[in-house]
């Protein structure tokens, strides 16, 4: 069995994929995370609901449990659907507030296996998750 990191959508974010997603802020769409299951995440976008595969749901659930994700204008946790199958979750550092105009830094930090995890910004980070639309 291969020990190489899987960069297909829904698995790990490749550093080039991360850079392109962060650079593509003009194509970002605000979404609401409805539910985080085992290996799947349910998102609401413009009134429609869709299920996406995501192999990093444990980290996603832990991030939401911090209570440090900024709220959108509807009082819901902010999440961003970015190009290249990337879900971006902004999260403030402990005892900080995520800035409204947080700068986007295309540098990313990595897991040991080479997958892009997050990009630092003022008082927080843009956390990156690979997702794949689930047509089932």
Image: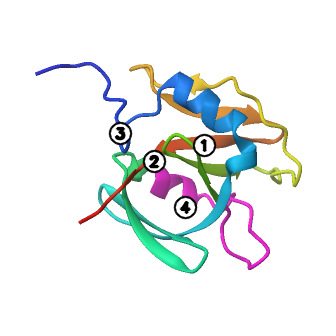
Q: Write the start and end of the magenta stretch as one range.
A: 60-78
Q: How is the image coloured?
A: rainbow
Residue at 60 percent across and 43 percent down: it is: 127
Q: Earlier in the sequence, mark 1 or mark 4?
A: 4
Q: Which mark is residue 127?
A: 1
* C-alpha span from label 1 to label 3: 14 Å
Is the C-beta separation of discs 2 and 1 under 8 Å?
Answer: yes
Q: Marks 2 and 4, how far apart in space?
A: 10 Å
Query: Above or below — where is 45 with respect to 64?
Result: below
**Magenta residues, dominant SS class:** loop
Element class at badge 3: loop
Residue under pointer 2: 59
According to the picture, the residue beneath numbered tag 3 turns out to be 11
> In the image, which is nearer the foreground, mark 3 or mark 4?
3
CA gap, disc 1 and disc 4:
14 Å
Which is more N-terminal, label 2 or label 3? Answer: 3
């Amino acid at each position: 069995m291969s020990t190489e990191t899987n960069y297909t959508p829904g698995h790990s974010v490749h550093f080039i994929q991360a850079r392109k997603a962060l650079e593509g802020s003009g194509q970002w769409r605000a979404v609401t995370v409805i539910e985080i299951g085992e290996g799947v995440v349910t998102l609401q976008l413009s009134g429609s609901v869709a299920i996406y595969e995501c192999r990093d749901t444990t980290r996603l659930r832990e991030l939401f449990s911090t209570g440090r994700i900024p709220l959108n204008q509807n009082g819901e946790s902010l999440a961003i659907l970015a190009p290249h199958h990337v879900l971006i979750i902004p999260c403030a550092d402990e005892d900080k507030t995520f800035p409204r105009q947080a700068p986007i830094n295309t540098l990313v930090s990595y897991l040991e296996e080479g997958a892009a995890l997050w990009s630092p910004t003022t008082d927080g980070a843009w956390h990156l998750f690979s997702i794949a639309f689930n047509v089932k």
